[in-house]
Image (cartoon, grey):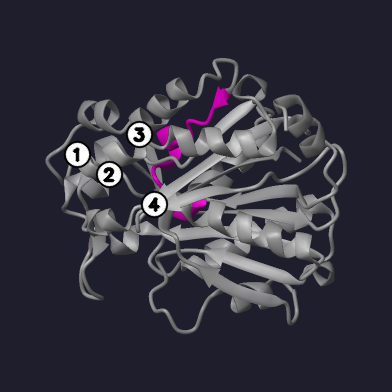
Amino acid sequence: MSAQTRRTSARTSTGPRILAFGHYQPERVVTNEELAARVDTSDEWIRSRVGIASRHIAAPQESVTDMAVHAGAKALAASGLPADEIDLVVLATCTQETQIPVAAPAVAHRLGIEAPGAYDINAGCAGFTYALAVTADALRAGSARNALVIGSDKMSAWVDPSDRSTCVIFADAAGAAVLAGRGSHDGWIGPVAWGSSGRNADKITVRDRHSFFAQDGQAVYRWATSLAPVALEACRRAGVAPTELAAFVPHQANLRIVRSLARQLGAPQALVADDIVESGNTSAASIPLALSRMTEQGRLHSGDPVLLLGFGHGLTCAAQVITAP
C-alpha cells in the first residue's frame, strides 16, 4: 500500500475520535528558587538540565482521584456529551496510595457516570498513550459507545523532597479526553505503535511500599532519545507523513529529550509541546495536560494531525497520531 493510499484511508476512517480535552493542575506553584532554598540546586542548574521553571504540587489532602475528577469534568463539559452517554472510563496512573480499590469506578461515580466499564492502567509516564490505544480499540470493536480516558498522577507523594535529582523534575496534574466511538472524515485516532524494554526495568523503580521513586537518569535519557523510530512507525501506520504533522506532543519528561526527539522526526513545521517548562514532569498526565493547554491557548486547531509519544517505567512506550478536536 502506498503512503498516499494509507493517508487517504486514515483520513476517511469512521473509527473513534477525540471530542474534547480537559485538565487540572493544583493551585500551589513551586518555583526553582523555592527548591533552591531547601536543596543543593539553582534555577540555572534545573533549567539547563531539564528545562523546568516551575511546577504544580498537590495539597496533602488532594488525591489522584480528586485530580482525575476535576480533569474529567472539564473534558465532559467541553465534549457536550452527558454523563450517561459514557460507558467506559479508563484511568492511567502509577501513584495511587494503594492498589485496592482501583480509582476509575470512584472517578466515574463522582462524575455522575453510573455503572460504566471502569479500570486503572499502569504504564507509568506512557500510561495515557496506552490507555488511549486500548480504549480506541474497545470503541472500534463496539465494546463501548463513548469513553473517558484520564491520566492522573501525584508524583510528589512518591518523590524524596531532599533528592535534587528527582524533586526538581516531578509534579502533579491530571489530563483527560472524551472519545466518541463513531468518527468522521475530520476526526480519528490512528493505530498505535508500542513496545517495551524489560531488560531495563530496573532503571526506574520504587523498591517497596516504603521507598521513594528512583531512576538511572542517564540510562533513561539514552533510551528515551532512541524512540524516534517508534514515533515514525505510528506515522506510517496512520498514513501521515512527518511533514504533514501540525504538532508533536511527547511525554514531557525533560526538555532536552523533547527537543532531541523533535529533531529526529524530520517535521520542522510541527509545533512541539513544551508544557514541561511550566508544569514539570507529571507522568501519565503530561500528554493530555499539554494537549488540553495547547487547545485552550489556540495553538491546536480542529482537525490538526498530532503525533503523541509516551514513554515511562517498565520500560514502556507507545505512540499514535490523532486529530485535534
**Contact flag, marks 4 and 3 (Cβ < 8 Å):** no
Label 2 residue SS: helix
- The span from disc 2 to disc 3 (Cα, nearest Å) is 8 Å
Q: Position of residue 84 (x, y in %)?
A: 83, 72
Front tag of 2 and 1: 2
**Contact flag, marks 2 and 1 (Cβ < 8 Å):** no
Q: Residue at x 74, y 74 (%)?
A: 113
Task: Identify the residue under disc 1.
Answer: 36
- The span from disc 2 to disc 1 (Cα, nearest Å) is 25 Å
Q: Inspect the image, locate mark 1, and give the three-letter code of the amino acid beneath it.
A: Ala
- The span from disc 1 to disc 3 (Cα, nearest Å) is 28 Å
The crowding category of the residue bearing disc 3, from other C-alpha atoms within 10 Å (few below 14, some 14 to 19, many at least 20), is some
Q: Position of residue 96 (x, y in %)?
A: 42, 71
The crowding category of the residue bearing disc 4, from other C-alpha atoms within 10 Å (few below 14, some 14 to 19, many at least 20), is many
What stretch of residues is rendered in magenta? 271-285
Label 4 residue SS: strand
Label at residue 225: 3
Name the residue furthest front.
1
Q: Residue at x 62, y 61 (%)?
A: 134
Q: Inspect the image, locate mark 4, and give the three-letter code of the amino acid beneath it.
A: Gly
Task: Identify the residue under disc 2.
Answer: 220
- The span from disc 4 to disc 3 (Cα, nearest Å) is 12 Å
Is 277 colored magenta in this rendering?
yes
**Contact flag, marks 2 and 3 (Cβ < 8 Å):** no
Q: Inspect the image, locate mark 3, and give the three-letter code of the amino acid beneath it.
A: Thr
